[in-house]
Image (spheres, helix red, strand yellow):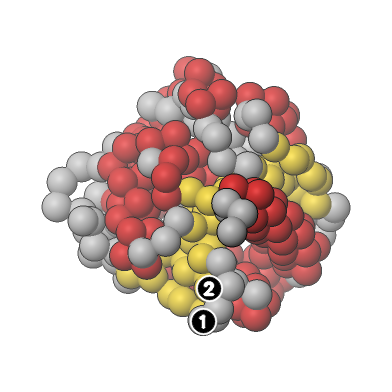
Amino acid sequence: MTAVHVEEAGTEGPLLLCLHGIGSSSAAFAPQLDALSAHARVVAWDAPGYAKSPDPEGELDLDGFADAAAGVIRSYGEPAHVLGVSWGGVIALRLAARHPELVASLIVADSSAGSGTDPEKAAGMRARATELAELGPRAFAAQRGPRLVSPEAPAELVQRVVDTMAGAVRLPGYGYAAQSMASADLRPELSAVTAPTLVVCGDRDTVTGIESSQVIAGGLHKCAYVIVKDAGHLANQEQPERFNSWVLSHLHIVTNQRTRTSERAEPCL
């Protein structure tokens, strides 16, 4: 199993695994670790080659990142509800298609079907590793971080996003992640995802945007789609109370449905 560092909060309730975006780390889920831990066992990873996680022994593609997430879930001994933001959402969707027995449900936030859906986007994603190498993490983060939130986001949030990115990204891990996104076009496999899914998007997201989230929602069989008001690409950080309320509602609905299904399946004695 690919080794990763995780942050944990909460001891009771369903298991919720949080997968961060391509320029981030487990620190991005501080609002979820804090607020949702009263209702769930919240686990946020540093993806292989990010932040406190060691560099992977070899190159990882999207399947490799999904398998690493599967290894984290297996270590807890039960299926997980998987929350993926942006690139994390792409990993979560591939995880659900590749390891359906490990995924109780999905929350896919401000994500897309991958950059491989558009040649220009794919080329831009592949160029990011060179950009990081030339600028270094701090300047790279200062250039990219502010666009991840809405123009009205408070200065302290913008700084936190930049600091998180600067402390998270490095080569070769970021390069592997960028290549995994550049190669991904999940549109043909969305219909194979059986996990009930909540698709979330900030109404001010200009990075992946509402249309990309709608593509995901439209391709899934069991899906609810919601817009988070006054939030950019990082809706879970910019509007955490609204975001967390939707996540809790989703977990409650899915858990209750599974309980009712289990009760109906029990034989009469």
Whether tag 1 and tag 2 are in contact, CB under 8 A, the answer is yes
Residue at point 46% right, 76% down? 8
Judged left or right of residue 190, residue 260 is right
Location of residue 58 in the rendering, given as x and y in whole percent from the top left corner: 15, 46
Location of residue 161 in the rendering, given as x and y in whole percent from the top left corner: 58, 65
Residue 69: which numbered mark, if any? none
Residue indicated by mark 1:
11
Judged left or right of residue 190, residue 182 is left
Location of residue 129 in the rendering, given as x and y in whole percent from the top left corner: 34, 43
Does any portion of residue 95 appear in the rendered image? no
Total label count?
Answer: 2
Residue indicated by mark 2:
41
Location of residue 17 in the rendering, given as x and y in whole percent from the top left corner: 49, 61
Query: For mark 1, does the 10 Å Cα neighbourhood hold few (<14), some (14 to 19), or many (20 or more) residues?
Result: few
Does any portion of residue 38 appear in the rendered image? yes
Q: In which quarter of the image is the N terminus?
A: bottom left
Closer-to-camera residue (73/22)? 73
Q: In which quarter of the image is the C terminus?
A: bottom right
Label 2, secondary structure: give it.
Answer: strand
Q: Which residue lies furthest to the front in this view?
A: 269
Up/down of 149 relative to 193, above or below: below
